[in-house]
Amino acid sequence: MHADATHENRGTETTQQFLTFALGQEEYGVEILKIQEIKGFSAVTPLPNAPAYVKGVLNLRGTIVPIVDLRQKFGMPEEAYTKFTVIVVVQVQGKTLGFVVDAVSDVLTVRGDAIQPTPDLHGQLDTTFLTGLAPTGEHGEKLVILLDIDKVLTASEAVAAAAAASQN
C-alpha cells in the first residue's frame, strides 16, 4: 500500500498527522499537508473595510497573502501578540492565506480510529469547520480540536479576503 506524509498504513491501522497550535488554553490541529510554512509574526499592512478578523496582508516572497487572526474569527478575546505568536501559511480553497495563532505546539500523529466525531450540539454551535477531536496526553485526557481549514472561512469570506489582498 502507498504511504504519504499524512497517512500511513500499518495493516488496517491508518494514521494522520496534524500540526497543532494554541489559541488561548485550547489546542487545535490542521492536517499537515495543508501547511505551506510557519512564519514568525511580523507587521502586516492593514486593509480598509476588511472584516475585523482580517488583520491585513503580507508580502511573502512576492505573493500578497491575506492574514486572518483565528482568535477573532473564532470570537475569542483579543490578546497582544507575543514572541511565540506565529503566522501559519496554508492553502485554502486554492488560495494562500496566513492564520495568526498564539503558538505552534507540535506535529501530532493520530490513529484514524482514535479521532472522535464532533459532538452534535443541535444547531446551537456551527461545527461545520471541525473534523473531530483527537485525544492526546498520556491517558488521552486532553483533546485537540481538529479543523477542516478549507471550511474555517466560508467560501465568500475566503474570496473577500483574497479580493481585499489583490486590491492592495
Image: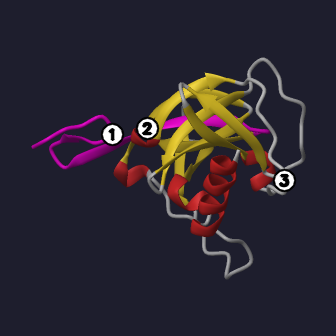
Are the residues tagged 1 and 2 within 8 Å (C-beta)?
Answer: yes
For marks 2 and 3 on the same chain, the one whose residue lies earlier in the sequence: 2
Amino acid at dot 3? Ala
**Residue 101 appears left or right of 144:** right
* Secondary structure found at label 2: helix
What x and y, as percent, mark residue 166?
62, 49
The extreme left residue here reads 1
Q: How is the image coloured?
A: secondary structure
Q: Which residue is mark 1?
A: 6
Q: Which residues are magenta?
A: 1-25
What x and y, as percent, mark residue 168?
71, 44
Of badges 3 and 1, the one in the foreground is 3
Q: CA distance from mark 1 to mark 2?
A: 7 Å
Q: Nearer the viewer, residue 2 or 119?
A: 2
Amino acid at dot 1? Thr
Q: Which residue is mark 3?
A: 52
Task: Residue at 42% x, 50% y: name it.
Answer: 114
The extreme front residue here reads 167
Task: Residue at 90% x, 31% y: name it.
Answer: 80
Q: Which residue is mark 2?
A: 32
What x and y, as percent, mark residue 90?
52, 41
Q: Nearer the viewer, residue 154 or 94?
A: 94
**Residue 108 appears left or right of 43:** left
